[in-house]
Image: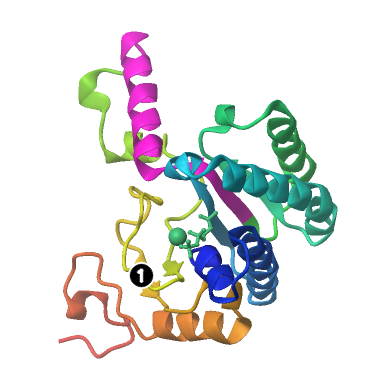
Amino acid sequence: MDGNGRWAERRHRPRVIGHRAGARAVNICIDFCLEKRIQALTLFAFSSENWGRPEGEVGALMKLFMNALEREVDELDRRGVRIRFIGERERFSATIVQRMALAESQTVSNTGLQLNIAASYGGRWDITQAARALAMDVAAGRLTPDDIDEAAMASRVALADLPAPDLFIRTGGEMRISNFLLWQLAYTELWFTDLLWPELDAVTLQRALDHYASRERRFGLTGAQVAPSDEIPE
Ligand code: IPE
Ligand code: MG
């Protein structure tokens, strides 16, 4: 979700106004996913690196985050959304941590949209904590180094119980991953738009889906190998 600051600056308004407009775009995105029956949505709300922004901006983002938690959770619960947070939670204030835990427990049995909020999240942090978990298992004798394979790693990164993301969307014109789900995105289709996050609408999201539908996903195989199986065999 990139471009909130620029959206505000173009209007000669403080950056926080852009973040507030960005929160509206989050709702548009969730509504779209619910309508399209998309199984999972992961929003990159706040990165490990965002803690380094000016204190006033971080404070404003925390306030917005807290307000959104207070305002939206009941309605999301009612709509069958399961909410989860991924990231280094300990860096948030106790009140926010408590709210996050509450949102998670309140919605834990919902089977509709799986909504994951990446907050204080970094892909490198994610891989590092998975490596640490593996090291602890080895130290405790539960695993040997030979047991460490891709599946062992995959089961310890965030969102291990969900399928890998099919589609990655970045707004704001930059063509980079910026430390998002590094492990999980290995074979994800990437889609970029110059639109700023607060400008996001259903038409743009549909464009991204249409683009996704036109891609051939080969996962390292050949086009012939992944072609639909109803073709005449040789
Ligand atoms: C993304 O918008 C929102 C967060 C990182 C919280 P930015 O704040 O990065 O907006 P730009 O990139 O400065 O326009
Ligand atoms: Mg940015």
Q: Can residue 90 be seen in this view?
A: yes
Image location of residue 82, percent across then percent down = 69, 51
**Residue drawn 63% across and 70% down?**
29
Q: Can residue 160 be seen in this view?
A: no
Of residues 51 and 29, the one drawn nearer to the viewer in this rendering: 51
Secondary structure found at label 1 = strand
**Residue drawn 35% across and 68% down?**
174
Which stretch appears magenta? Answer: 115-142
Whether residue 234 is in magenta: the answer is no
Q: In which quarter of the image is the C terminus?
A: bottom left
**Residue drawn 48% across and 80% down?**
209
226 with respect to 27 (left or right): left
Image location of residue 205, percent across then percent down = 54, 79
Of residues 170 and 112, the one drawn nearer to the viewer in this rendering: 170
Residue 156 appears in which quarter of the rendering? top left
Of residues 90 and 230, the one drawn nearer to the viewer in this rendering: 90
**Residue drawn 70% across and 60% down?**
112
Residue assigned mark 1: 190
Which SS does the magenta portion mostly show? Answer: helix
> Seen from this angle, which residue lies furthest bottom?
232
